[in-house]
Image (cartoon, rainbow, N blue to C red):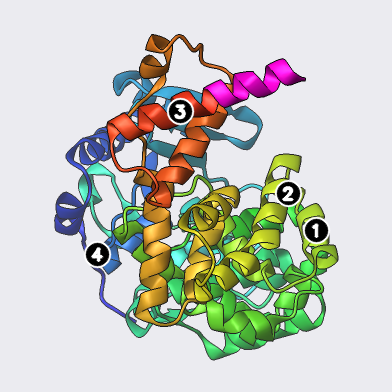
Amino acid sequence: VMSPVNIQELMYHNLPADYMEILKWAGEKALSMGAKVYAAGGIVRDLLLGIECLDIDLVVEGDGIELARAISKEHQGRLREHNQFGTAKILFPDGRQVDVTTSRTEFYQYPAAMPQVEASSLHQDLYRRDFTINAMAVSINKESFGDVVDYFGGREDLERGLIRVLHNLSFVEDPVRILRAVRFEQRYYMSLESHTLKLAREAMHNNMLARVSTERIWEELKHVFLEPRPGLVLARFMELQLWPSLFPGVEPEKVRPVLDKITRSLRTLRYWNVVEPSEIWMIYFLAVLHFSDWTVASEVCRRYHLSKRQTNKVAAALGGWRSILKKLQEPFGVTMSELARQVKSVPGEIYPLILCYLTGNSVKKRFRHVLNAVFYNKPQINGKDLRLLGYEPGKQYKRAMEALWQARLDGVICNRQEEMNYVKKYLVNFEGAKDNV
Ligand code: CTP
């Protein structure tokens, strides 16, 4: 057992000053209300690891709603109350948020062996949580500000790098925790503690995940896809044979090599200044599905209730990447404009995957060149010039500009004057064609 520790200093160093102010203020307010208040969960874990954490989760022994009201009033937050649960969310103008829960003693049955002295409502609140590293709190009460509350050895597990459940039924109570365990393990380069791993395997063996709604699984998967290194998490899911439950029908072996490379590819694309795709999670979802037939992939999309728009995007990406890859690798006879047109026609979320498959510097360079063309090679003339020529913006104008873009990429056109001539000619031909109809 580790000796008690106070992390006030750490808090001052690692939390934004305005947050510290709120915490201090909340502690004093609680005192005047005869309540106690703690910051719990991820914030303690991340403070001890020296990692930034902006989500604050307060546990109040007393009236949590009343304290939340006071905090939001004093600090210009918007309050969302859930009175039946005794919880509230405070939203601050800068986008950060503080969750406040009321810890309660009344509904809880303690295992007989648990000494009753420990049965504070904070203890019970923490005991309901998933892993020891997530089940710590830090006092923000005036007299004990910064004292870490660690009933279950969370600090020791953090130091040893172990993800450990608090009790044997944890995965049965909430099977999503199997996925969370792996997510935290990979995020912090830790390991599942051996008994915990055994319990997780048992829960998987009993097909516990099938009892969870696909909505909850998808919520967790999206969390995974937004981790710093989703590939590691997905690879570990594979190792633990979770893929059949998560992505039915998908053959893992084909996907495995990509998982190690995809985050690096994404980083390379950022370095190349390629415009960030709008749905980062989809990069990893596509990586999972890229080798599957559309029957399998579309079934997975349906399973997780992707919208029509998202499903279409997935379809476009999965239908397009192979041919782009082939054209990049066999450049003879493929014009720059054709390549650029194809690359532009698939969602940007598939670009990292394409890059994973490119070997050799010259091919990568070619891809970079094409992407550069897609995002940054813009004609010098614009709508204003066309209007001066007497053309109104419209369908044919768009087509003309598209044709001009392609001509530029193929090096047919090199300067502003040539651009003007090209578009003029294009539009005249177009008009002529129209007259002939
Ligand atoms: N929790 C749990 N079981 C779950 C989900 C959450 O016990 N299925 C608990 C965890 O102990 C966690 C707390 O609820 O500390 C808050 O959950 P969440 O915000 O998801 O976790 P964080 O620890 O903040 O993780 P992240 O850094 O990914 O936001």
Report helix, strand or loop for mark 2: helix
Type of amino acid under label 3: Val
Residue drawn at x 63%, y 79% is 255
Q: Which residue is mark 3?
A: 423
Kindly report which numbered mark, 4 or 2, lies closer to the viewer in this rendering. 2
Q: Is residue 272 above or below residue 431?
A: below
Image spot of residue 418 (x, y percent): 34, 34
* Res. 111 visible in picture: no
Q: CA distance from mark 2 to mark 3?
A: 37 Å
Q: CA distance from mark 4 to mark 1?
A: 42 Å
* Res. 415 visible in picture: yes
Q: Which residue is mark 1?
A: 298
Type of amino acid under label 4: Gly
Mark 2: few/some/many CA within 10 Å (<14, 14-19, 20+)? some
Image spot of residue 96 (x, y percent): 37, 37
Say which quarter of the image contains residue 93: top left
Residue drawn at x 40%, y 79% is 189
Report helix, strand or loop for mark 3: helix
Report helix, strand or loop for mark 1: helix
Q: Which residue is mark 4?
A: 50
Type of amino acid under label 1: Ser
Kindly report which numbered mark, 3 or 1, lies closer to the viewer in this rendering. 3
Inspect the magenta stretch and tell me whether residue 435 lies in it: yes
Image spot of residue 195 (x, y percent): 59, 88
Residue 77 is marked as: none
Segment tinted magenta in the rendering:
428-437
Q: Is residue 1 above or below residue 290?
A: below
Q: Is residue 210 above or below residue 72?
A: below
